[in-house]
Image (spheres, rainbow, N blue to C red):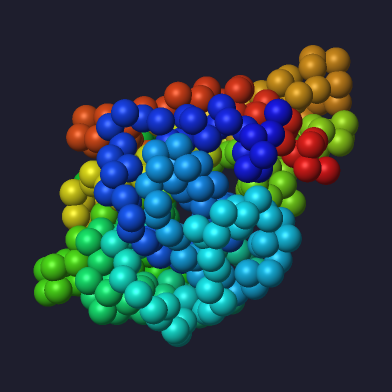
Amino acid sequence: MKSGRGLSIEDLENATSDPKLPWDQLKNGRIFVTGATGFFGTWVLESFFFANEKHHLNAQLVGLARRPELFKEKCPHLFQKGNITLLRGDVRDFEFPEGAFSHVIHGATTSSALVPSLEMLETIILGTRRMLQFAEQKKVKRVLFVSSGAVYGKQPGDLMQIPESFTGGPDLMDPISAYGEGKRAGELLCAIAYQEKGIEVAIARCFAFVGPYLPLDAHFAIGNFIRDALGGFPIQIKDGRPFRSYLYASDLVRWLWTILFLGQPCRPYNVGSDQAVSIADLAQQVKSTLQGSTSNPPVAAPEPRPGDLAPRYVPSTRRGQEELRLRQTIPLDLAIRKTAAWAKVEA
């Protein structure tokens, strides 16, 4: 059941109702959000709208988007009260909106495999520089830089969970590393801004997620699996060996708000689930959750070679758990059902 604001009341409560979230930091304030119309950004806007009304914050949000008119068509409910506005622009060279701002969430990036590597790298680095210039000029109190687990490069197969202290990195001779290396450079720019300018930048290294607004026809395996299962088709698996983990979007956005408000500056926090699942098992779980045991089975995954360590992309979230009391509250099977229910309504 929808809330009238796009997402369910249940999801919005889960995203915003943690008692340790100091929403009063936004009282009568203004927050600037880049990447405001993507998967992360939409959840940020939805949760802001809900918290703003619930806690009577009288806060304003300005979001940066390349094509704001398309987003307004998709989510008109977010613009009924007038406390959310969208600014047209490119994160690399956007014009600074007038007025004061207290917080920034910098989520703009380009992670599509269809984007040329050089454009991806430049967008991340130049966009982060522009955002930090904005934060300095506006004397912003707190900034959240949405980074990625891609900064670690290839996770060793015998390392079950990757901690923030891991010092690996992307392969500089592989152009596919542009995204991860761009995020690494972005984190360095944030560290320089904190040391030289005193800009308090919290860093969230994000892994893999599932939930409403996730595209089901992009490069996200779980989204593709849900799409195939809902259509009654066999779930297509290219390689069933890799291990991933998935955090539901209401948990994700609650973690992001927590890190923005409470995270130590330039002390990165992994954001994601620490519950690993192979791609083959994920396909089976999606099938059994949405199709039942008698429907079309997933396509068989290739058998692993003897002694072959399966690729992993699974974070340790111990730092966030211990320092910020971050918790995963939505198990994977429920996350799959919630995402599928949303997709059926939106179809």
In the rendered image, residue 245, in percent from the top left (x then y), is placed at 49, 35
Q: Nearer the viewer, residue 102 or 209?
A: 102
Please give left or right for residue 221 compared with residue 177 in the image.
Answer: right
Look at the picture and state if 234 lies above or below 139: above
Q: Nearer the viewer, residue 303 or 211?
A: 211
Name the residue located 23 percent from the left edge and 44 percent from the top edge. Answer: 262
Q: Quadrant of residue 23?
A: top left
Q: Quadrant of residue 274?
A: top left
In the rendered image, residue 217, in percent from the top left (x then y), is placed at 74, 51
Look at the picture and state if 257 lies above or below 112: above
Q: Nearer the viewer, residue 237 or 26?
A: 26
Q: How many callouts does the rendering have?
A: 0
Look at the picture and state if 160 lies above or below 95: above
In the rendered image, residue 210, in percent from the top left (x then y), is placed at 58, 39
> Can residue 157 be spotted in the picture?
no
State the quadrant of the C terminus: top right
> Can residue 57 be spotted in the picture?
yes
Name the residue located 71 percent from the left edge and 21 percent from the top edge. Answer: 289
State the quadrant of the N terminus: top right
Name the residue located 19 percent from the left edge and 55 percent from the top edge. Answer: 265
Q: Quadrant of residue 160?
A: top left
